[in-house]
Amino acid sequence: MTREKEIAKEARMKVTSFQISKKLSEIGFFAETEFYWVETEKGRKQVDYVEYEVGTFYGEWKYTKAFDLETILEALPMGLDMFDGRFVLIIDQRSFFAYANFDKGTQILQIIKQQDESLADTAARLLITLQEKDLIINEE
């Protein structure tokens, strides 16, 4: 396997899936990234490391930003101030992401990691849910 293919395979395992990346784009999530899902005119999708201005090469290919876990975690609020008090972000890397209030023993949101789902996807689903429930606002 060539080094380029190894990097692409490793990247696929560490960045948001094509479907989650597309949803992040639809809700207006913006962050710097060097990885993109590239969709060819034949519909083939692959993750790629892109060092140049996206869209300047390959004509009909479509590019969708892919994000790593660190980028998604930086976008998630560490806590949410709600009517019931302060809810802090809890991460259990094997099973879930949630916001909980330890004083009251309550939580307002929990996203359970699905089988074979990357942590980047699980964290991104939490970010998408927060946005859809108007609990956070994307700022560029």
Image: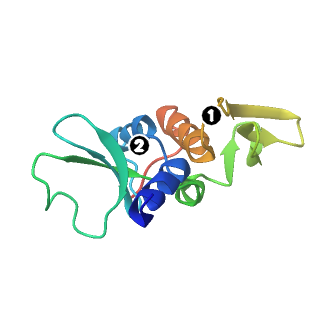
Considering every residue shown, the one lying at the far front of the view is 1
- Which numbered dot is residue 116? 1
Tell me how far mark 1 sits from mark 2, CA to CA: 17 Å
Residue flagged by tag 2: what amino acid is it? Ser
- Which of the image's four quarters has the N terminus? bottom left
- Which numbered dot is residue 21? 2
Query: Is residue 101 rendered to the left or right of residue 116?
Result: right
Where does residue 49 sit, x and y in percent of width and height?
Answer: 37, 62
Residue 119 higher or lower than 125, as above or below: below
Query: Is residue 77 rendered to the left or right of residue 45?
Result: right
**Which is more toward the observer, 9 or 123?**
9
Q: Are marks 1 and 2 in contact (CB under 8 Å)?
A: no
Residue shown at 11% from the left, 46% from the top:
60
How many labels were placed on the picture? 2
Residue shown at 65% from the left, 29% from the top:
114
Numbered disc 1: secondary structure: loop
**Which is more toward the observer, 139 or 49?**
49
